[in-house]
Image: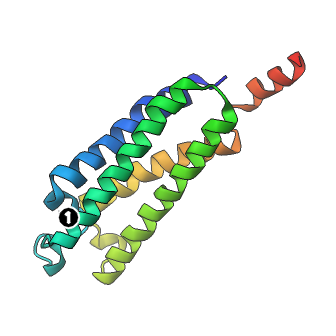
C-alpha cells in the first residue's frame, strides 16, 4: 500500500505542478523563456524553433500527468510507482542540468545573480525531486513492506 503523503503528492500535487509547466510551455511560451532569460537578454526573443521545442516539452509534461493521474491511481504496486517516479526523476535532473547550462551561458551562475524565477524553479523542482528520491529509496515504505512480508 502506498502511504497517504506519496499517494496524494504523486497523483494530485505533482501533476498540478506539471500542468502549470505544460500550460506555460504550450500557451505562454514568452513567460517560459522569460523564466530562464531576462527579457533584456537577446536570447529571450521567441523564435519558431523555441515554440516547437516548448510545445514538445508541454506534450511531454502532459504524458507525465496522464501516467501520474491514471496509472498511479489504477495500481497500488510499489514497484510500478517506483518505475514511474524513477522515469520522472530523469526529467527532474534534466531540468536542473538545462537550467545550469542556461545560466552558465548567460554568465549568471553566481547565487547572487539568480532571479526569483530561477529560485522558484529550483525550489519547486528540488522539493519534488527530494520527495521522488525518498519514495524510490523506500523512505516511509519500510514498515508497510515489512508488514506485508510478515503476512506472507
* Secondary-structure class at tag 1: helix
Which quarter of the rendering shows the C terminus?
A: top right
Q: Looking at this view, is 123 or 90 the one in front? A: 90
**In the image, 86: left or right of 19?**
right
Q: Residue at x 56, y 22 (%)?
A: 4
The percent position of residue 29, horizontal first and vertical second, equals 17, 58
The one nearer the camera, 78 or 117, is 78
Outermost residue, top side: 151
Identify the residue shown where x is 35% and y is 41%. 17
Give 46 or 122, whichever is nearer the viewer: 46
**Which residue is under mark 1?**
51
The image quadrant where one finds the N terminus is top right
Residue 38 figure quarter: bottom left
Q: Is residue 50 above or below residue 42?
A: above
Residue at image position (39%, 57%) is: 122
* Residue 100 screen position, x and y as percent: 40, 72
Q: Is residue 37 above or below residue 149?
A: below
Q: Is residue 112 above or below residue 145?
A: below
Residue 140 appears in the rendering: no
State left or right for residue 64 relative to residue 134: left
Residue 56 sits in quarter:
bottom left
Q: Residue at x 38, y 76 (%)?
A: 101
Tell me where residue 113 appears, x and y as whole percent.
28, 73
Residue 59 visible? The answer is yes
Disc 1 crowd rating (10 Å Cα; few below 14, some 14-19, many 20+) is some
Amino acid at each position: 500500500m502506498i502511504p497517504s503523503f506519496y499517494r496524494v503528492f504523486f497523483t494530485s500535487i505533482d501533476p498540478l505542478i506539471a500542468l502549470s509547466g505544460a500550460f506555460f510551455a504550450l500557451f505562454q511560451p514568452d513567460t517560459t523563456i522569460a523564466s530562464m532569460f531576462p527579457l533584456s537578454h537577446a536570447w529571450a526573443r521567441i523564435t519558431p524553433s523555441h515554440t516547437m521545442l516548448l510545445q514538445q516539452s508541454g506534450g511531454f509534461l502532459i504524458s507525465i500527468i496522464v501516467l501520474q493521474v491514471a496509472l498511479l491511481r489504477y495500481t497500488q504496486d510499489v514497484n510500478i510507482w517506483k518505475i514511474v517516479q524513477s522515469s520522472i526523476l530523469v526529467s527532474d535532473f534534466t531540468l536542473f542540468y538545462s537550467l545550469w547550462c542556461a545560466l552558465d551561458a548567460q554568465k549568471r551562475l553566481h547565487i547572487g545573480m539568480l532571479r526569483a524565477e530561477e529560485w522558484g524553479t529550483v525550489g519547486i523542482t528540488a522539493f519534488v525531486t527530494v520527495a521522488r528520491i525518498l519514495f524510490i529509496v523506500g523512505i516511509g515504505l519500510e514498515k508497510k513492506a515489512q508488514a506485508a512480508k510478515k503476512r506472507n
